Amino acid sequence: MSNFLLIGICILVGLILRRYTKLPGDAHKGVNALIINLALPAVSFKYLPHLQWTKAMILPAMMPVVVWLCGWLYIKVYASKAGLDKQTESGLKLVTGLSNTSFVGFPLVAAYFSDDALGIAVICDQVSFMLLATAGIVVAMNASEKHTLSAAMVARKVISFPPFIACVAALILPLFVNLSPLDPLFDKLAATVAPLALFSIGLQMKFDGWRHQVKHLSVSLLYKLVLAPFIIYGIACLFEMRGIIPQISIFEAAMPSFLTAGIVASEYNLNPKLSSLVVGISIFVSFFTTALWYLIIVTLQ
Protein backbone atom coordinates (compact mmCIF):
# COMPACT_ATOMS: atom_id res chain seq x y z
CA MET A 1 0.00 0.00 0.00
CA SER A 2 2.87 2.39 0.77
CA ASN A 3 4.19 2.00 -2.79
CA PHE A 4 0.84 3.02 -4.28
CA LEU A 5 0.61 5.95 -1.86
CA LEU A 6 4.06 7.07 -3.03
CA ILE A 7 2.96 6.84 -6.67
CA GLY A 8 -0.12 8.98 -6.02
CA ILE A 9 1.71 11.59 -3.95
CA CYS A 10 4.59 12.04 -6.40
CA ILE A 11 2.30 12.53 -9.40
CA LEU A 12 -0.04 14.79 -7.44
CA VAL A 13 2.82 17.00 -6.27
CA GLY A 14 3.99 17.39 -9.86
CA LEU A 15 0.47 18.23 -11.07
CA ILE A 16 -0.06 20.80 -8.31
CA LEU A 17 3.29 22.49 -8.88
CA ARG A 18 2.70 22.72 -12.63
CA ARG A 19 -0.82 24.10 -12.15
CA TYR A 20 -0.40 26.50 -9.25
CA THR A 21 3.20 27.72 -9.31
CA LYS A 22 5.33 29.69 -11.72
CA LEU A 23 7.57 26.80 -12.66
CA PRO A 24 8.85 27.10 -16.24
CA GLY A 25 7.08 24.91 -18.79
CA ASP A 26 10.19 22.78 -19.26
CA ALA A 27 10.91 22.27 -15.54
CA HIS A 28 10.58 18.53 -16.01
CA LYS A 29 13.70 18.50 -18.19
CA GLY A 30 15.95 19.03 -15.17
CA VAL A 31 14.29 16.14 -13.35
CA ASN A 32 14.55 13.96 -16.44
CA ALA A 33 18.26 14.76 -16.73
CA LEU A 34 18.84 13.40 -13.21
CA ILE A 35 16.90 10.26 -14.01
CA ILE A 36 18.60 9.60 -17.34
CA ASN A 37 22.16 10.43 -16.29
CA LEU A 38 22.23 9.02 -12.74
CA ALA A 39 19.20 7.04 -11.60
CA LEU A 40 18.61 4.76 -14.62
CA PRO A 41 22.32 3.88 -15.03
CA ALA A 42 22.39 2.98 -11.33
CA VAL A 43 19.44 0.61 -11.87
CA SER A 44 21.46 -1.24 -14.52
CA PHE A 45 24.47 -1.58 -12.21
CA LYS A 46 22.30 -2.64 -9.30
CA TYR A 47 20.42 -5.46 -11.06
CA LEU A 48 22.03 -6.62 -14.31
CA PRO A 49 25.23 -8.11 -12.83
CA HIS A 50 23.13 -10.33 -10.59
CA LEU A 51 20.64 -11.61 -13.17
CA GLN A 52 20.57 -15.30 -14.00
CA TRP A 53 20.54 -15.41 -17.80
CA THR A 54 18.31 -18.14 -19.24
CA LYS A 55 16.44 -18.79 -22.48
CA ALA A 56 13.37 -17.21 -20.85
CA MET A 57 15.16 -13.83 -20.99
CA ILE A 58 14.42 -13.79 -24.71
CA LEU A 59 10.83 -12.77 -23.95
CA PRO A 60 11.56 -9.45 -22.15
CA ALA A 61 14.11 -8.63 -24.85
CA MET A 62 11.68 -9.41 -27.68
CA MET A 63 8.57 -7.92 -26.05
CA PRO A 64 9.20 -4.28 -27.12
CA VAL A 65 10.02 -5.43 -30.68
CA VAL A 66 6.81 -7.46 -30.98
CA VAL A 67 4.72 -4.62 -29.49
CA TRP A 68 6.35 -2.09 -31.85
CA LEU A 69 5.87 -4.18 -35.00
CA CYS A 70 2.26 -5.06 -34.22
CA GLY A 71 1.56 -1.45 -33.23
CA TRP A 72 3.09 -0.16 -36.47
CA LEU A 73 0.86 -2.46 -38.51
CA TYR A 74 -2.19 -1.66 -36.35
CA ILE A 75 -1.81 2.10 -36.90
CA LYS A 76 -0.96 1.60 -40.58
CA VAL A 77 -4.30 -0.18 -41.12
CA TYR A 78 -6.20 2.39 -39.05
CA ALA A 79 -4.57 5.33 -40.85
CA SER A 80 -5.52 3.84 -44.20
CA LYS A 81 -9.16 3.43 -43.20
CA ALA A 82 -9.40 6.80 -41.42
CA GLY A 83 -7.53 8.73 -44.12
CA LEU A 84 -4.95 10.18 -41.72
CA ASP A 85 -2.22 12.48 -42.95
CA LYS A 86 1.36 11.23 -42.80
CA GLN A 87 2.32 13.33 -39.76
CA THR A 88 -0.63 12.14 -37.65
CA GLU A 89 -0.07 8.53 -38.69
CA SER A 90 3.61 8.66 -37.77
CA GLY A 91 2.92 10.38 -34.45
CA LEU A 92 0.42 7.66 -33.56
CA LYS A 93 2.91 4.96 -34.52
CA LEU A 94 5.43 6.42 -32.07
CA VAL A 95 3.14 6.80 -29.07
CA THR A 96 1.13 3.61 -29.72
CA GLY A 97 3.98 1.20 -30.40
CA LEU A 98 6.46 2.20 -27.68
CA SER A 99 5.91 1.53 -23.98
CA ASN A 100 6.86 3.60 -20.95
CA THR A 101 8.90 0.78 -19.46
CA SER A 102 10.97 2.92 -17.07
CA PHE A 103 9.32 6.15 -15.84
CA VAL A 104 6.02 4.35 -15.25
CA GLY A 105 7.11 0.73 -15.62
CA PHE A 106 9.77 0.66 -12.90
CA PRO A 107 7.62 2.15 -10.12
CA LEU A 108 4.68 -0.12 -10.98
CA VAL A 109 6.82 -3.25 -11.28
CA ALA A 110 8.29 -2.50 -7.87
CA ALA A 111 4.83 -1.82 -6.41
CA TYR A 112 3.08 -4.91 -7.81
CA PHE A 113 5.94 -7.38 -7.80
CA SER A 114 9.22 -6.52 -6.08
CA ASP A 115 12.38 -4.44 -6.46
CA ASP A 116 14.22 -7.59 -7.57
CA ALA A 117 11.95 -7.82 -10.63
CA LEU A 118 13.41 -4.53 -11.90
CA GLY A 119 16.34 -6.46 -13.36
CA ILE A 120 13.95 -7.98 -15.92
CA ALA A 121 12.27 -4.60 -16.49
CA VAL A 122 15.67 -3.07 -17.30
CA ILE A 123 15.98 -5.42 -20.28
CA CYS A 124 12.56 -4.34 -21.59
CA ASP A 125 13.51 -0.70 -21.14
CA GLN A 126 16.84 -0.86 -22.97
CA VAL A 127 15.25 -2.50 -26.00
CA SER A 128 12.41 0.06 -25.90
CA PHE A 129 14.91 2.90 -26.00
CA MET A 130 16.90 1.35 -28.85
CA LEU A 131 13.68 0.99 -30.85
CA LEU A 132 12.84 4.65 -30.29
CA ALA A 133 16.36 5.76 -31.20
CA THR A 134 16.40 3.67 -34.40
CA ALA A 135 13.02 2.63 -35.84
CA GLY A 136 11.21 5.50 -34.06
CA ILE A 137 13.57 8.15 -35.41
CA VAL A 138 13.32 6.65 -38.90
CA VAL A 139 9.50 6.87 -38.76
CA ALA A 140 9.69 10.47 -37.50
CA MET A 141 12.19 11.60 -40.12
CA ASN A 142 10.33 9.95 -42.98
CA ALA A 143 7.22 11.94 -42.04
CA SER A 144 9.00 15.21 -41.39
CA GLU A 145 9.51 17.82 -44.08
CA LYS A 146 12.37 19.51 -42.24
CA HIS A 147 14.65 16.60 -41.38
CA THR A 148 16.68 14.19 -43.48
CA LEU A 149 17.50 10.66 -42.36
CA SER A 150 21.08 10.02 -41.26
CA ALA A 151 22.33 6.60 -40.17
CA ALA A 152 25.23 8.24 -38.33
CA MET A 153 22.86 10.43 -36.34
CA VAL A 154 20.71 7.43 -35.38
CA ALA A 155 23.77 5.44 -34.28
CA ARG A 156 25.07 8.42 -32.31
CA LYS A 157 21.78 8.72 -30.42
CA VAL A 158 21.97 5.06 -29.36
CA ILE A 159 25.61 4.84 -28.28
CA SER A 160 25.59 8.21 -26.47
CA PHE A 161 22.50 7.48 -24.34
CA PRO A 162 23.69 7.16 -20.69
CA PRO A 163 21.34 4.30 -19.67
CA PHE A 164 22.46 2.32 -22.73
CA ILE A 165 26.14 2.91 -21.91
CA ALA A 166 25.46 1.85 -18.31
CA CYS A 167 23.60 -1.26 -19.47
CA VAL A 168 26.56 -2.40 -21.59
CA ALA A 169 29.03 -1.51 -18.83
CA ALA A 170 26.97 -3.34 -16.18
CA LEU A 171 27.09 -6.49 -18.30
CA ILE A 172 30.82 -6.32 -19.13
CA LEU A 173 32.66 -4.67 -16.20
CA PRO A 174 31.71 -7.28 -13.53
CA LEU A 175 33.58 -9.87 -15.63
CA PHE A 176 36.82 -8.00 -14.90
CA VAL A 177 36.20 -5.77 -11.86
CA ASN A 178 34.53 -6.34 -8.50
CA LEU A 179 31.87 -3.62 -8.28
CA SER A 180 30.31 -4.82 -5.02
CA PRO A 181 31.90 -2.00 -2.92
CA LEU A 182 29.77 0.41 -4.99
CA ASP A 183 26.51 -1.45 -4.35
CA PRO A 184 25.37 0.95 -1.57
CA LEU A 185 25.80 3.88 -3.97
CA PHE A 186 23.86 2.09 -6.70
CA ASP A 187 21.12 1.26 -4.19
CA LYS A 188 20.70 4.91 -3.16
CA LEU A 189 20.67 6.26 -6.71
CA ALA A 190 18.35 3.53 -8.02
CA ALA A 191 15.89 4.28 -5.22
CA THR A 192 15.35 7.76 -6.67
CA VAL A 193 13.97 6.47 -9.99
CA ALA A 194 10.38 5.96 -8.83
CA PRO A 195 9.77 9.29 -7.02
CA LEU A 196 11.64 11.39 -9.58
CA ALA A 197 10.00 9.70 -12.57
CA LEU A 198 6.50 10.00 -11.12
CA PHE A 199 7.11 13.62 -10.14
CA SER A 200 8.27 14.33 -13.71
CA ILE A 201 5.13 12.69 -15.07
CA GLY A 202 3.00 14.94 -12.87
CA LEU A 203 4.80 17.98 -14.28
CA GLN A 204 4.08 16.87 -17.85
CA MET A 205 0.56 15.42 -17.79
CA LYS A 206 -1.90 17.42 -19.91
CA PHE A 207 -5.48 16.59 -20.88
CA ASP A 208 -6.74 19.75 -22.62
CA GLY A 209 -8.68 19.17 -25.84
CA TRP A 210 -9.13 15.42 -25.50
CA ARG A 211 -12.82 15.53 -26.51
CA HIS A 212 -11.89 16.53 -30.06
CA GLN A 213 -9.55 13.56 -30.43
CA VAL A 214 -11.64 10.80 -28.84
CA LYS A 215 -11.61 8.51 -31.89
CA HIS A 216 -7.83 8.57 -32.38
CA LEU A 217 -7.25 8.36 -28.63
CA SER A 218 -9.52 5.34 -28.26
CA VAL A 219 -7.82 3.46 -31.08
CA SER A 220 -4.34 4.16 -29.68
CA LEU A 221 -5.23 3.35 -26.06
CA LEU A 222 -7.02 0.15 -27.04
CA TYR A 223 -3.83 -1.21 -28.53
CA LYS A 224 -1.38 0.21 -26.00
CA LEU A 225 -3.21 -0.83 -22.83
CA VAL A 226 -5.18 -3.91 -23.92
CA LEU A 227 -4.06 -5.54 -27.16
CA ALA A 228 -0.28 -5.18 -26.68
CA PRO A 229 -0.14 -7.03 -23.34
CA PHE A 230 -2.65 -9.56 -24.67
CA ILE A 231 -0.29 -10.35 -27.56
CA ILE A 232 2.64 -10.95 -25.19
CA TYR A 233 0.39 -12.97 -22.90
CA GLY A 234 -0.58 -15.12 -25.89
CA ILE A 235 3.09 -15.70 -26.79
CA ALA A 236 3.88 -16.71 -23.20
CA CYS A 237 0.96 -19.17 -23.21
CA LEU A 238 1.89 -20.53 -26.66
CA PHE A 239 5.39 -21.44 -25.49
CA GLU A 240 4.13 -22.51 -22.03
CA MET A 241 6.27 -19.94 -20.23
CA ARG A 242 5.64 -19.54 -16.51
CA GLY A 243 7.15 -17.54 -13.66
CA ILE A 244 8.32 -14.04 -12.96
CA ILE A 245 10.08 -13.43 -16.31
CA PRO A 246 6.98 -13.78 -18.54
CA GLN A 247 4.89 -12.03 -15.88
CA ILE A 248 7.10 -8.93 -15.96
CA SER A 249 7.25 -9.07 -19.77
CA ILE A 250 3.44 -9.05 -20.02
CA PHE A 251 3.15 -6.36 -17.35
CA GLU A 252 5.69 -4.10 -19.05
CA ALA A 253 3.81 -4.54 -22.34
CA ALA A 254 0.76 -3.11 -20.54
CA MET A 255 2.55 0.14 -19.75
CA PRO A 256 1.33 3.44 -21.26
CA SER A 257 2.97 5.36 -24.09
CA PHE A 258 6.65 6.24 -23.95
CA LEU A 259 7.09 9.84 -22.75
CA THR A 260 10.11 10.36 -24.95
CA ALA A 261 8.16 9.13 -27.99
CA GLY A 262 5.76 12.02 -27.42
CA ILE A 263 8.70 14.41 -27.22
CA VAL A 264 10.09 13.08 -30.51
CA ALA A 265 6.65 13.44 -32.12
CA SER A 266 6.56 17.06 -30.97
CA GLU A 267 10.12 17.76 -32.16
CA TYR A 268 9.31 16.48 -35.65
CA ASN A 269 5.86 18.14 -35.71
CA LEU A 270 3.94 14.85 -35.95
CA ASN A 271 0.59 16.17 -34.69
CA PRO A 272 2.16 17.03 -31.31
CA LYS A 273 -1.22 17.88 -29.73
CA LEU A 274 -2.61 14.40 -30.35
CA SER A 275 0.67 12.67 -29.43
CA SER A 276 0.84 14.53 -26.12
CA LEU A 277 -2.77 13.64 -25.33
CA VAL A 278 -2.15 9.95 -25.99
CA VAL A 279 0.86 10.00 -23.68
CA GLY A 280 -0.86 11.88 -20.84
CA ILE A 281 -4.17 10.04 -20.92
CA SER A 282 -2.55 6.62 -21.38
CA ILE A 283 -0.48 7.22 -18.24
CA PHE A 284 -3.57 8.15 -16.24
CA VAL A 285 -5.68 5.24 -17.53
CA SER A 286 -2.83 2.76 -17.14
CA PHE A 287 -2.96 2.99 -13.35
CA PHE A 288 -6.31 1.21 -13.61
CA THR A 289 -5.60 -1.14 -16.53
CA THR A 290 -2.29 -2.35 -15.10
CA ALA A 291 -4.11 -3.34 -11.90
CA LEU A 292 -6.42 -5.52 -14.00
CA TRP A 293 -3.50 -6.98 -15.92
CA TYR A 294 -1.72 -7.80 -12.68
CA LEU A 295 -4.76 -9.78 -11.52
CA ILE A 296 -4.92 -11.59 -14.85
CA ILE A 297 -1.20 -12.37 -14.80
CA VAL A 298 -1.02 -13.76 -11.26
CA THR A 299 -4.27 -15.68 -11.68
CA LEU A 300 -3.62 -17.33 -15.03
CA GLN A 301 0.16 -17.36 -15.35
Image (spheres, helix red, strand yellow):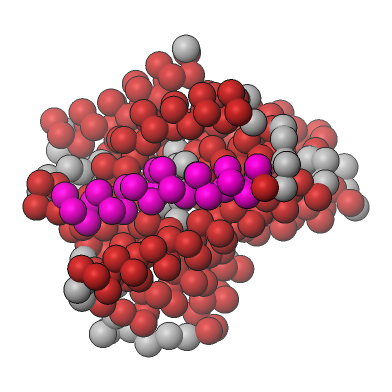
Residue 175 vertical position relative to residue 286 in the rendered view, above or below: below
User: For residue 3: magenta?
Assistant: no
| Residue 43 visible in the picture | no
Which residue corresponds to the image point at 51% horizontal and 24% vertical from the top-left? 295
Residue found at x 34% / y 65%: 75
Query: Mostly what secondary structure, the magenta segment?
Result: helix
Q: Quadrant of residue 28?
A: top left
- Left or right, 293 with respect to 243, comes to left
Quadrant the C terminus occupies: top right
Q: What residue lies at 29% left-to-right and 80% top-to-bottom?
A: 144
- Residue closer to the observer: 149 or 74: 74
Q: Quadrant of residue 44?
A: top right
- 82 vs 227, left or right, is left
Residue 236 point in image, percent of width and height:
65, 44
**Which residues make up the magenta segment?**
214-237
Magenta stretch contains residue 218: yes
Q: Is residue 35 left or right of residue 275?
A: right
Work out whether residue 74 or residue 61 is closer to the camera in this orientation and state it: 74
